[in-house]
Image: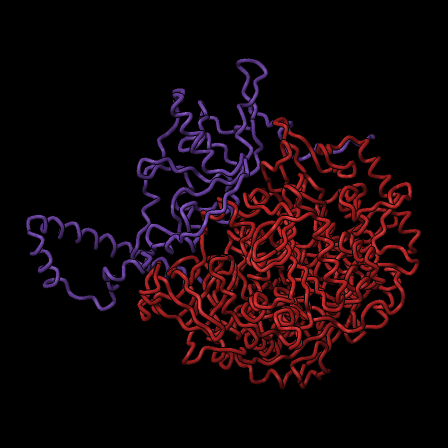
Chain colours: A purple, B red
Amino acid sequence: MKSPARKLAVVAALVAFTTGLSGYFMGQLQADRSAAARSASQILNLKSEILPSAPDALAAPTYADLAQRTHQPNHAWKNSLADLPPAPAFTAATPPLSRVELDRILATRAERRAYNGAPPTVPHPIDQSASFSCLACHGQPTRIGGRDVPQLSHPAYTSCIQCHAPQNGPGSQLACPPAPLATPVLANTFAGLPPPAGGTRAHPSAPPTMPHTTQMRQNCLSCHGPGGSSAIKTPHPQQSSCLQCHATDAARETLPPPLHPFP
Amino acid sequence: MQRRDFLRATALAAASTVIARRLGAAVPEGLPAYATSPTATVTADGVRWDKAPCRFCGTGCHVRVGVKDGRVVAIQGDPQAEVNKGLLCMKGYHVGGILYGKDRLTTPQLRRDGGLVDISWEEAIDILARRVMKNPAGFAFYGSGQWTIPEGYAAQKLMKAGLSNNHIEPNARLCMASAVTGYLSVYGVDEPAGCYDDLDAADVIILWGNNPAEMHPVLFSRFIDRRTRGEKVLLLDIGTRRTRTTPYADHYLEMRPQSDLAIANGIAHLLLANGTWNRAFVEKHCNFRHDPTGKSLNGEPLTFEGYRQALAPYTPDYVEKISGVSAEKIRLLGDLFGNPALRITSLWCMGMNQHTRGTAINRLVHGIHLLSGHWGRPGDAPTSLTGQPSACGTAREVGTLCHALPGGLLVANPEHRAECEELWHVPPGRIHPQPGYHTVQLWEKFCTPADQGGDIHTVFVQVTNPGQTLPDLARTFNGKAALADKFLVVSDVYPTATTALADLILPAALWVEKNGVYGNSERRTQQWFKQVEPPGQARPDAWMTLALARRLYELGHPGMKDRDGNFLFTFRDASGREVPAWDYAHYYDINTDRALYDEYRRFTFHKHKHVAPYDELVKARGLRWPVVEQADGTFKETRFRFMEFSDPFVKKGAGIQFYHSVTKDDRALIWFNPYEPATEEPDNAYPFWLCTGRVIEHWHTGTMTMRVPQLRSSMPNAYVELHPDDARALGLRNGDMATLETRRGRLDLPVWLDGRGQPPRGSVFVPFFDQNFLINQITLGDTCPISKEPDYKKCAVRILRRAATQSS
């Protein structure tokens, strides 16, 4: 539907934008350097003196307004997530986990699921109005602030908060949530299915079978690769065709086998 | 089918379950043999898995329920279900948790001297029966679109065939009555012609006041995920606020509330003005209608010229003036509908239905599809969605409404009454010829003293929570508290805003704690078996109805007998012996659900709504009616109605045939209805629009979902959304308490800015799930004059900063 002229305009705008942006940061960098020698009061004065007021610049919110504002990206915002270092290449076998580490991983896993197989809940605040923003971080395995960020295990589905419920209430980091109200918590005695024990091996050197179904788990490396949340990490990440060797377990399929054609 | 044949069929069915058992499918311990399910299996970890439709919305996803040691322990999206193909939403994944809230109701309770005391089931049923006996005409039954089909059918039969009383209504009156009157006045018969397969084929999807990302998430993913696979799906969001759906839309058309009427007329205007209407389709398949009184279901004939003249004022500029949607965007809509190469599906739910002109806007959206010929091919469909799992199955198809009889038949039609009396085997004249009270009326009568015309003295509520969902609660519900001679009986699973005023509380079995059959938004009938025991003395709603009927029979109510003097609900086992299903000890001796369903199924043939035989449903993940027997004895479902390539009832060679046409000439009706302002619009005293609705985490009044920790943590309380500029002008910040005041009352709510939805200036939104913030205390009770459905989406409100002295 896009006309070539429009495409051209977009490209031109992008070029202009990138040039402008790098110029801005270069300028900022230099200003910061020269400013380093001055006192805080001088900087304040300097800004009001020498910075021309740009008529189309966004007004900075006042402190009084901060609580009301979501600091959502404006046109000058640059998404730098793609520049984050990817998770380290994963070529060597991981050393076995200590009991303490293993317990911690299993406890975290249990805490974030109502039962084995439930979609994990979200342990951090989210952008309430843009579901697909999840993919900015969870679209690839990465590390942010020292934490592993698991990649989506089912690439076809992108309406993430359809299934994954944030557990810290409806707030986001930047917009204050409605104050939690002192309403009685309604207790629940639901006890979810615990996680499975490991798969089975035909003999000591055979590849283990999978102790779970593959539904919603098309990307094994989401959990078992670098940045994954599972306690079990593949010792041979260079081999990525997992189902070639690791068989699913028919005894774990929740659907009955097809009916025998001869009764 | 004669009565004897019917009994024989029941016996045969019982025998076939014995055969099924021999095949060795797993039957849970303690459950009857007929709960043998070909869809069940046991995994290596000792968990038994079987199918069930999800308990929540009208999408009708199937889940696999994992049961171990008599308790639900896990849920899986059913990969074999066509509706959801293995996917669920956060409510569906956590549906198992709804059974295990700590405060489940487990014993019948009677209000005595202001407190609730435990009583026995025998006493409870006796008290209710004696209330009914005192004055059967003043008894009302209020159920919901969460009634299973057998439950709704039993209630329907008790009321209309037994008590000669038409005061039976479902809460579905509050959510899809306008969709029903829309289908009836356009096609002469209720329910969508298309189905969810349209979502796989459509090039353009138009959402009319609809937020499927939160309300029907699995259907939303069904078309959004097509984009992931590289397909092009153009999404248009016509709405009154930005929602979670909006960021996915290619075009967001923000309209002034109520102006959808003008937008639809604007599209029709452009189709005529541009000559892009489908002349061949219209000349072959359509007639024109209008409704000069504004109150008529079937209106009056209109000429094409009259139709054109009526639409003449709706130019893009005029529509822009009314709706606030730019003339350019109106032209875009006109161009899309004018392009025969595209496949266009319109979706709507409460935005169009909860509308004081709900019938009119439903007609208009059908009208632009018919006028443009975007009708009759997969992907070209006007389709209403429902909010409850069996709003279609039980409310609409079983006809648990004050004016309806099962299978789309009508109380007011003498032939229909006679037909039902025949099928029910009751004496001629048993069915009362006058329709009963519709929902809002029924509750007003209940809340009015008897000496002032309040002639409803007792209401039996099952599977719904009117104390939270009725509009303008002071008028429709809370008034009961002051009236000593009114008696409220509530069957539910948890304490609710309704049980708070109940005189008698009955503990109900929930979802897989009983057998059931539901009917979803796409005409799909879905069956499941009981998989766990209900807690304490909780029992199925269908049993309560049978027990009440039996007690009335014992007390001598003449209506509880059929023509032969037999009890109205007589069931027999395989050997022909009568089974006293009203006695709970014997309720599961036979599959009572199946017996009721088989009896009901006979009513569905009249209007070609043939629901599938029970045994077919047992094998399937639901089947879309009409389900018609083939020459080889198999049964085939129908994906697209009135279309020859799919619907077996269409005459060969007709292509498209509207065989229940209002005008009896196989044509659908294209209606003109004018834009009219809402019955209450913002003014100087009440300057904001108030809209109410749902959030993804909570289903309806949150009685189930607020007890699931994962859902409650995600959305713990209600809030008011408003535009940041309005908030600033009012001196309100995020988290502050605001006071909302309408002509009906006031309510304090925390403010949420830039949160999940973003209303435009002059408009606010409040979800209705939270019992601690009953927004329906201040909503409007005005209804569509044809469908009698209230408008929960529009009324005038003023917003104040809550006075500091009031803050807690």
Vertical order, B463 against B291 (above or below): above
Q: How many marks?
A: 0
Residue A8 seen in the current view: no
The front one of B232 and B312 is B312
Vertical order, B375 against B703 (above or below): below
Vertical order, A98 against B542 (above or below): above
Q: Is residue B86 left or right of residue B766?
A: right
Where residue A177 appears, as percent x and y from the top left, is 37, 54
The front one of A24 and B47 is B47
Q: Quadrant of residue B641?
A: bottom right
Q: Look at 71% across and 56% down and name the residue there.
A: B127
Q: Look at 84% across and 72% down and name the residue there.
A: B414
Instruction: Name the residue furthest front.
Output: B113
Which corner quadrant holds the C terminus of chain B? bottom left
Q: Quadrant of residue B734?
A: bottom left
Which corner quadrant holds the N terminus of chain B? bottom right
Q: Quadrant of residue B263?
A: bottom right
Residue B452 seen in the current view: yes
Q: Is residue A196 left or right of residue B291?
A: left
Q: Is residue B600 left or right of residue B341?
A: right
Instruction: Name the residue furthest top.
Output: A204
Where residue B552 appears, as percent x and y from the top left, is 79, 58
Where residue B475 appears, as percent x and y from the top left, is 56, 71
Where residue B332 appears, as percent x and y from the top left, is 52, 70
